[in-house]
Amino acid sequence: MSKLLEMDVLIQMNGEAYLDPHSRRLAKKLLKGGVIQVMGSDCHNMDRRPPNLGPALQELQKGKLAEQREDILWQNEKIFMAARG
């Protein structure tokens, strides 16, 4: 992972990783460590894989990760603005 972090890339985590109790501990560690810069939603449909970015960002706030949440929101907006041209 250290070689990846040395590269000029953004690392994304899906919201599900923070919402799932089985992966939350690792997700929190990666967020606090500054490894994750972008958060997305692995939405494929509304039944089995609904969009969950909103709930994940709310949970970050509750989990005392407000600074990381703000950084992610800023980076996500920057990406979308660049994509718009």
Image (cartoon, rainbow, N blue to C red):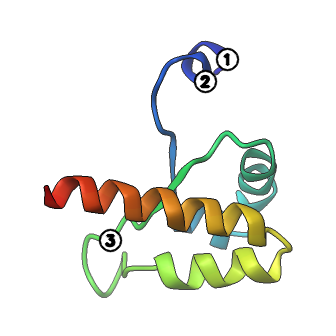
Residue 21 placement: quadrant: bottom right
**Of the residues under marks 3 and 2, which one precedes in the sequence?**
2
Q: Which residue is mark 1?
A: 2
Q: Where is mark 3, residue-wise?
A: 43
Q: Residue at x 38, y 80 (%)?
A: 51
Q: Secondary structure at mark 1?
A: helix
Q: Which residue: 81% across, 56% down? A: 25
Alpha carbons under labels 1 and 2: distance apart: 5 Å
Circles 1 and 2: CB distance less than 8 Å? yes
Q: Nearer the viewer, residue 80 or 47?
A: 80
Tag 2 residue: 5
Residue at horizontal 73 percent and vertical 45 percent from the top: 30
In this view, 54 is above or below 1: below
- Please name the amino acid that badge 3 sits on: Cys
Residue 33 vertical placement versus 64 (above, below): above
Q: Is residue 39 left or right of residue 60?
A: left
